Amino acid sequence: QKEVEQDPGPLSVPEGAIVSLNCTYSNSAFQYFMWYRQYSRKGPELLMYTYSSGNKEDGRFTAQVDKSSKYISLFIRDSQPSDSATYLCALDTGRRALTFGSGTRLQVQP
Amino acid sequence: DVKVTQSSRYLVKRTGEKVFLECVQDMDHENMFWYRQDPGLGLRLIYFSYDVKMKEKGDIPEGYSVSREKKERFSLILESASTNQTSMYLCASRPLNRGNTGELFFGEGSRLTVL
């Protein structure tokens, strides 16, 4: 079993839709939770970061962590064509490198 | 601005060739990492380094080696390239204390094709 599971998609939504992206994990040592966004032919860039259970909001983006269920989510409100990218969850024990999910490819149709 | 530079964006090599992938960061970060990215598998850690001349194996080190002679430079070496090493290679760095968020700063990637 992989440490981090993420649905690879692709996910295609119309502009303005609410998008939900999810990861599950098995290692309870993960303490820090991130979402990276990767545009085509570019390196990943940090989008959201949190270290506790609950919600964290930044503009149209909300990161949600449920440590008891080992489940993390990223919600995108009022999605835009510029949000079309691959979204990767990344988890960190704080003692090593990040462990990434496989990434979900999102396409927002204008 | 934070910068991680991978010298080669696209390479085509033949089976058995020795391949060097170079990565330079200008942020004075202690930690540097090499990942490979494949469809459906995400990013997998090959090697990382906490300091000059220090290295540690990641999850998939077989067929790879690394070199860190200077703090700003971390090289990935494929001693004898094979077709199953065709992939996107991503270099990343972050400070020793993880910074405020633990963020990894990535280069733009090196796409290697082994024929």
Image (cartoon, coloured by chain):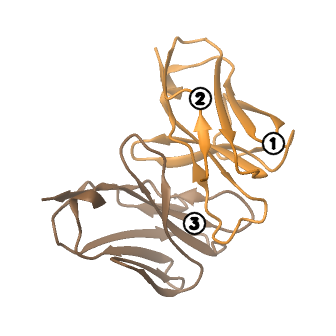
Q: The residue tagged with tag 2: helix, strand or loop? A: loop
Distance between the Cα atoms at labels 2 and 1? Answer: 16 Å
In the rendered view, would you say B39 is above or below A24? above
- Residue in the image at 52% along x and 11% along y: B14
In the rendered view, would you say B112 is above or below B59? above
The residue that mark 3 highlights is A91
Q: The residue tagged with tag 1: helix, strand or loop? A: loop
The answer to which of marks 2 and 1 sits earlier in the sequence is 2
**Of the residues tagged 3 and 2, which is closer to the observer?**
2
Which quarter shows the C terminus of chain A?
Answer: bottom left
Residue that protrudes farthest toward the right in the picture? B53
Same chain assignment for discs 3 and 2: no
- Residue in the image at 66% along x and 28% along y: B63
Kind of residue sitting beneath label 3: Leu
The residue that mark 1 highlights is B71
Same chain assignment for discs 1 and 3: no
Label 3: how many Cα within 10 Å (few below 14, some 14–19, many 20+): many
In the rendered view, would you say B87 is above or below B114? below
Q: Residue A42 occupies which quadrant of the picture? A: top left
Instruction: Give the letter of the chain under mark 3.
Output: A
- Residue in the image at 61% along x and 47% along y: B3
Q: Position of residue B23 (x, y in %)?
A: 65, 35
Distance between the Cα atoms at labels 1 and 3? Answer: 25 Å
Q: Which residue is nearer to you in this view: B61 or A51?
A: A51
Q: Does residue A98 appear to the left or right of A4 in the view shown?
A: right
Kind of residue sitting beneath label 2: Ser
The residue that mark 2 highlights is B7
Name chain B's colour. Answer: orange
Kind of residue sitting beneath label 1: Lys
**Of the residues tagged 1 and 3, which is closer to the observer?**
1
